[in-house]
Image: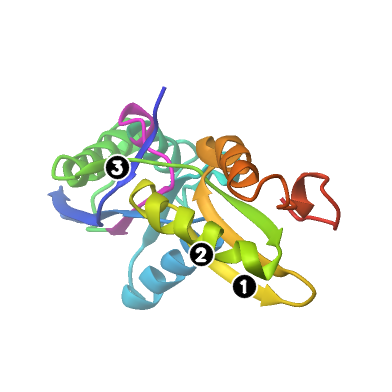
Amino acid sequence: MPTYTLASPVHAEIDIRKSRFIAQAVPVADRDAAMAEIERLRALHPTATHVCWALLAGGQSGMSDDGEPSGTAGRPILEVLRHHDLDGVLATVVRYYGGVKLGAGGLVRAYTDAIAGALKQAERIERIAYATLVIEVDYADEPRVRRWLEQSAAQGCSLADTAYGALARLEIKLPAAMRAEAIDTLRDATHGRACFPDDGDGGDGDV
C-alpha cells in the first residue's frame, strides 16, 4: 500500500472560545528536520501557550502535547496524519490560550479540526523510498554507467558523488525498488566488470 507525503506546506487557523489554533503540516526528510522546524515555530511564536506536534516518519515518528492534558493534542494530530496515509510529514498546532478552558473533549476536537482544516487543501504525492548504490568500474566503462544514468534520470536516478583512484567510483541515488534491477543492468552493460562494494563485491559498504 503506497504512502504519501505533501507536495508543499499547508496552513490553517481557527478560533475556538477565544483560543487561537494555528495549524501547519510540512513535508520533512527525518526527525532532525522536524525538530528544527518545531524550534523555528517556537522562535516565531515566543508567547504561544503551546506548540503541539505529531510526526510520521517511519521509525522516527513521535508526538508531543507540550503541556496540554495527556492525549488531547499530539495523539489527535497524529491520528489525522494516519487517516490521510501520510509519511514524512510533521504536523504542528500552535495555541494561544484565550482564557476559556475547553475541557479534554473540546481540546481533542480543536486540535483535530485545526490540522484537518490545513490538510483539506493539501496536495499529496506518493512517497518513494530512495537507496544508494555504489559502483566501481574501470575508466573505460565509466561512460557506460553515465549513459545508463542519463537514460534513468526520469525514473529518479541521479549521481550523488564520484571518486577516482585505481577505479572510478560512482555513488548513485535511486528508488529503492530499482536497486536490484540496476545492479543487473550495469553488470550486463560492463560485461560483468562492474563491482558493487556495498553488495559484497569487494570493499566495505554502508547501505
Residue designated by label 3: 111
In the image, which residues are magenta? 81-96
Query: Which residue is nearer to you in this view: 145 or 163?
Result: 145
Query: Which residue is nearer to you in this view: 107 or 197?
Result: 197
Picture quadrant of residue 99: bottom left
The amino acid type, in three-letter code, at marker 2 is: Leu
Picture quadrant of residue 108: top left
The x and y percentages for residue 126 are: 33, 38
> SS class of the residue under badge 1?
strand
Q: Residue at x 33, y 33 (%)?
A: 80
Q: Where 100 sits versus 97, above or below?
A: above
Query: Which residue is nearer to you in this view: 51 or 84?
Result: 84
Circles 3, 1 touching at the beta carbon (< 8 Å) = no
Circles 1, 2 touching at the beta carbon (< 8 Å) = yes
Q: How far apart in space, not on screen, are marks 1 and 2 (Cα)? A: 8 Å
Q: Which one is closest to the eye, mark 3 or mark 2?
A: 2
Of the numbered discs 3 and 2, the one sitting upstream in the chain is: 3
Query: Which residue is nearer to you in this view: 83 or 69?
Result: 83
Residue designated by label 2: 159
Q: Left or right of 4: which side holds 141?
A: right
Q: Quadrant of the N terminus?
A: top left
Residue designated by label 1: 162
Q: How far apart in space, not on screen, are marks 3 and 2 (Cα)? A: 42 Å
Q: How far apart in space, not on screen, are marks 3 and 1 (Cα)? A: 47 Å
